[in-house]
Amino acid sequence: MSGARQDSTETKNGKWAQRPVKARNFRCAGFTLIELTVVIFILGLVALLVVPRLPFAQERDLGTAARTFAGTLRYLQNHAISTKLYYRLRIRILDGAMEVMRVLPEDEEVAVTDPALMKLALREGVEFADITTSRLGKISEGETAIDFSPLGADEFLLFHLKSQAGSRFFTVALYPGSGRVEVLEGYQEGTLSDGDGAKDFSLEEKEEGQ
């Protein structure tokens, strides 16, 4: 007999007869819900550890940090103009710590009450490479203070941000008078020239690594 199993069965007269038995169908076993959950968890953990170390992820974080910082500068400048008050932004270049204080007429500093200007910090993994001001030039260490009056920023400023794990740069430029804030990829140098009695600010890109 082809393919079918034979099973012996005793009949009433004591003789044995062969009874065909259908072959059993076995299904292939799949993953259980617990196994799938464990696999997804492991893949997610690997992605969490590996993706932030990739160059494109670091560059994305650096760009996000530069745009966030630019937004803070815009908000602080607009706040000073709308409230007609004086503010001072203190930045420690080494660790990127930032603090905004309100400046009284006697140059006394008091804490701000606006939640948007409190607990400021750069994104993790991003730091200041240096800060260039039209008054003091390039500052690459220590602390610098940036004043904002009811007319906006007092001077032309360049903030160079870099990733701690790489050599990528972003530049945030703050222009006095107009209050314009620009975010540019790369390390941009600033030049200030007096043409026909008017101050002209321009930027030129510097090769990274120099």
Image: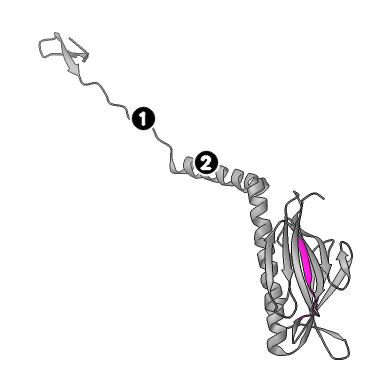
Q: Is residue 120 visible?
A: no
Residue drawn at x 72%, y 65% is 172
Residue indicated by mark 1: 28
The amino acid on which the numbered mark 1 sits, given as a three-letter code, is Cys
Q: Work out which residue is located at the far left of the displayed protein and give it.
A: 13
The quarter of the picture where the N terminus appears is top left
Q: How is the image coloured?
A: one colour
Gap between marks 1 and 2, in whole Å?
Answer: 20 Å
Percent x, y for residue 189?
78, 61
Q: Earlier in the sequence, mark 1 or mark 2?
A: 1
- Give residue 17's quadrant in the image: top left
Judged left or right of residue 33, residue 159 is right
- Residues in magenta, as a range: 153-160
Residue drawn at x 52%, y 44% is 40
- Give residue 18's quadrant in the image: top left
Judged left or right of residue 190, residue 181 is left
Question: Does the magenta segment cover residue 158?
Answer: yes
- Give residue 141's quadrant in the image: bottom right
Q: Is residue 41 visible?
A: yes
Residue 39 shows which numbered tag? 2
Residue drawn at x 81%, y 70% is 192
Judged left or right of residue 28, residue 36 is right
Question: Does the magenta segment cover residue 107?
Answer: no
- Residue 24 or 27: which is nearer the viewer? 27
- How many labels sit on residues? 2
The amino acid on which the numbered mark 2 sits, given as a three-letter code, is Val
Q: Residues within 10 Å of mark 1 (few under 14, many from 20)?
A: few
